Amino acid sequence: MKPSIRTVRTPTRGFTLVELMISVAVMGIVMLAIYGAFFKTQRAADSVTGVVADRQSARGAVQLLERELRMAGSGWGRSVVVGTSNGAGHIDLNPINFGYGGPDANDTLSIVGGWEASTLLASGMPNASATLKVGDTSGFADGDLVVITDGTTADMFEVTQVNSQSLILQHNPSSPFNDPGGHSTWPGTGYNTGAQAYKVTWVTYKVDSTSYRKPALIRAQVGRAPQIAAYDVSGFRVYYQMQDSSLTRNPASLNFVARVLPVVYTRALSPNRVALNDSVWASIRPRTF
């Protein structure tokens, strides 16, 4: 008879407190490394997303500027528009009006053109107080600015009422834009029948650093509420290429400007680097130049 074999069991041994503490510490270090890498990647992704959004915003603003700069002076070319502005008396408006802010400051840019609606005078205007009768009032509304031009001189008024039946664009002196004193250079023979009448778009681009959480490039059109053209910008500069190919931000005269180069600067922020400046720009030659 074979003797029976007994199985000897080894006593079960657990983890000591020291081993558990070491395991927890190692696990914590690993998790901290994983979460650190995750949040670092997330911050980098957010930074790239912000840069892309800011650049896209700046690109949209430059495209809008490009469209309006191409149409600057539509209807009267480089001729100066004469009128009044908000009761300030006589003003001379160029198709493109410079706003040099200084070496380290932002510029402003004002653009005037008649690219929305136009018609012809149905009767002559011997003086600035004469009736403004046109061949068609379509596209004109109360509060619109209108420029009368014969191709050489140009004068601006504000429409106070549109009379579609009699085809008259009233320009009562109650409007601060219709001060008779603002038309001191009215042509001697007035504007004859057939002279052009244009609905005017007058916009100004400038940086607003106080009205919003971050600086924004504002498009301000006369008669309308300001609009944000680009958000979170770090600068706006306007360069002018002269006919001799030189560049300046402060030209002496519009007559020698060949092209306009608006530049919108954006700022790329990185937790590991200083702020980097990026820019979106265009080079535009107005069609009437």
Image (cartoon, helix red, strand yellow):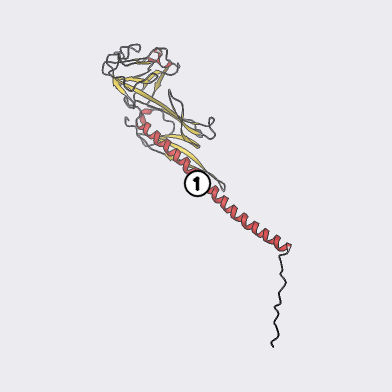
User: What is the quadrant of the C terminus in the image?
Assistant: top left
Residue 132 is drawn in which quadrant? top left
Mark 1 residue type = Val
In the image shown, does 244 or 174 lie closer to the viewer? Answer: 174
**Does any portion of residue 62 appear in the rendered image?**
yes
Residue 106 position within the rendered picture, expressed as x and y whole percent measured from the top left: 49, 33
Query: Badge 1 is on which residue?
Result: 48
Q: Residue at the spot x=62%, y=58% of the render? A: 30
| Left or right placement of residue 71 versus residue 13 in this view | left
- What x and y, as percent, mark residue 165? 30, 14
Apparent side of residue 279 relative to residue 159 in the rendered image (left or right): right
At which x and y percent is residue 173? 40, 12
Q: Nearer the viewer, residue 226 or 155?
A: 226
Q: Residues within 10 Å of mark 1 (few under 14, many from 20)?
A: some
Q: Is residue 89 above or below residue 78?
A: above
Snapshot quadrant of residue 138: top left
Q: Quadrant of residue 19?
A: bottom right
The local secondary structure at tag 1 comes to helix
